[in-house]
Image (tube, rainbow, N blue to C red):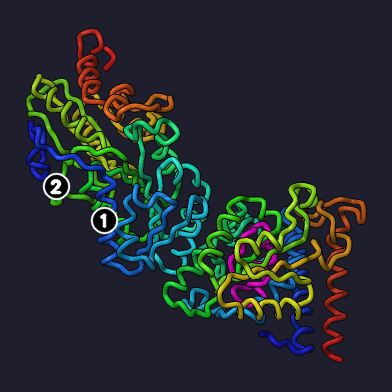
Amino acid sequence: MYYLSDSEVDKLEAKAAEIRQSVIEMLVAAGSGHTAGPLGMADIFTLLYFSVLRQDPKNPDWPERDRLVLSNGHICPVLYATLAHRGYFDTTELLTLRKFGSRLQGHPHRGSLPGIETSSGPLGSGLSQAVGMAMGLRMDNPYTSQYVYCLMSDGELQEGQSWEAAMLAGKERLHNLIVIVDRNAIQIDGYTEDVMPLEPLREKFESWNFDVQEIDGHNIRMVADAIGKAQAVYSQPSVIIAHTIPGKGVDIFERDFHWHGNPPGKGPENRVKKGDQAKEALRKLRTLSGSLTNSEDK
Amino acid sequence: MKLANHLNPNIFTDKLEKAPNRDGFGEGLLAAGQKDSQVVALSADLTESTRVNLFAEAFPDRFVQCGVAEQNMASVASGLAAVGKVPFIASYAMFSPGRNWEQIRTTVAYNDQNVKIIGAHSGVSVGPDGATHQAIEDIAIMRVMPNMIVIAPADTHEAKKAVLFAAAHKGPVYIRLGRSPVPVVTTTGSPFELGKAQLLMEPDSSARNRTGIVTTGSLLYEALCAAKELNEAGFGVSVLHMPTIKPLDESALVRLAEESDLLITLEEHQVAGGLGGAVAEFLSERRPVKIVRLGVHDEFGQSGEPEELVAHYGMDRKTVVETVKNAFSREKLKVL
């Protein structure tokens, strides 16, 4: 289990706020990209990269490392920002996102940037790759404690391949596979339950022989506890259904599916005019960041 | 007429053995598994038919039964390769790479992962199963994919060599196999080298009306029989065997084009995008020559016996012979 002290939680929350700021700055510089998903997953990415994953940013190909597969590649701004803040590459490079010649491709490309385990973007194939990695590691050592974390969206569970992969993971009882589903309930065309209902989601995974936990994906301590429990499940793969708020951290973006695929400055104007969206987002995050830092000082 | 000296001594006799080239794949995979403990195999419910069963019985812990799920199989293989395994995925070409093309493109080729894709049951010679199971587009869809190597072995011996090559080579490889037994033209001693075509038959140097037949995969024997008949009838016909379609042996093609009045490409595949397409694309830029592409012309296959289907779609020795004779007949000569 992961025991996080109050001060560790505070530090992680402050780091997540920094990462959210980077995400906004990157998206504004790029002029395109996805906003809601990266902000919604910032807490989980921060926890994984700053507390959970066995890894070495200076030796990204270390064979003993844990693997993190990002299946829904379109939320890569949060992956890139987290990798940079963790020291895989310089944070100044973040502003090259989506630009010609950049290592920060619009969707992740393995081989372009250190720390990217797989290319992704076309939805539904990440879980299969994670299953392959978990099986391969287990072939080398049946008792392996090298974990494969697969981060995926809820919308991509509409891809049949996701369930092909889940079937195989359940059949093989992959104890070293931990799936985290970003259950933010939105996708490009609307709310998931309107577009193509996923519920009952827990039961779907249970029927494929997964251990299932449902948690608040913004409560860092709760996420850490869930990962600790998932690691302790020995005879099954694990899935953590993390309920998140799309656009989390910036109230003008939160819970609105229109922010799935738009960057600040190009989103709906029902709350803030386009020209002020980036500024407003950064103001909110800096205020949040400041208050978190101050609470740590106290 | 000169024939390469490493071919089966029973060639052109009734004693020439036949075997499906998937047999060679099965033996090659087993041998590759014995040689390298990182080699693993995946099947999508076609284990015996694709001959993965030999490997699966010998190495049950390194065999993954994926069930009827080719898309998952391709990406699982990518994940296995990411942790150092050398995965072979085997199914019918219609399903892999047919159904799972995007998974192969993104998670294998774009990722540059060390996955080997075995597409069995290619061509119309699949026979009675009919068009749904006859992959005649797979060369086209695989050769347009960056990072991908495309190989179509002629017979069981060559299939085995191709598999051993693929296991030792780092990077994605596609190997195309057939279902039906085909003449075993080569021997265990015949050469196989990536990207190298082999000139297996050459006409007498004095022969005129020179034709080069370029062929790949299971139609090699048809090409050789047609060439023999034509050479004996006074035509000057060479046979260039191209087991590797990508990378293309460009220098062998230029040489053949320079020595020929006409090239014929012969393959169990659509003429668009396959070997014929590859040869025509390349030579039209580098060394233009009249090319007749023999293969399937924008149609689907159908049920039937392999031989009658190969003949119906114009890929048998008779069609090759007629094509050459017509091309050099007095009236047609003008078009050359």
> B270 and B128: which one is in front?
B128
SS class, disc 2: loop
Could you say where residue B184 lies in the image, as x and y percent from the top left?
17, 41
Q: Residue at x 71, y 72 (%)?
A: A44
Horizontal arrangement in the rendering, residue B100 relative to residue B87 (left or right): right
Residue beneath the point at 25% across and 50% down: B24
Furthest residue in direction right, as rendered: A271
- Label 2: chain letter: B
Q: Is residue B292 magenta?
A: no
Image coordinates for residue A95, horizontal then vertical, percent: 69, 64
The residue under label 2 is: B187
From this viewpoint, is residue A128 visible? yes
**Where does the C terminus of chain B fall, quadrant-wise?**
top left
Figure check: A245 above or below B53: below
Closer to the camera, B129 or A225?
B129
The residue beneath circle 1 is: B28
User: Around disc 2, counting alpha carbons within 10 Å, would you say few (fewer than 14), some (14 to 19), or many (20 or more)?
Assistant: some
- Residue lying at the far front of the rendered structure: A207
| Residue A80 visible in the shown view | no
Q: Name the one closer to the observer, B220 or A177.
A: A177
Q: Which mark is residue A1?
A: none
Q: Residue A130: name its quadrant.
A: bottom right
- Quarter of the N terminus of chain B within the rendering: top left
x and y percent of residue B283 in the render?
Answer: 32, 33
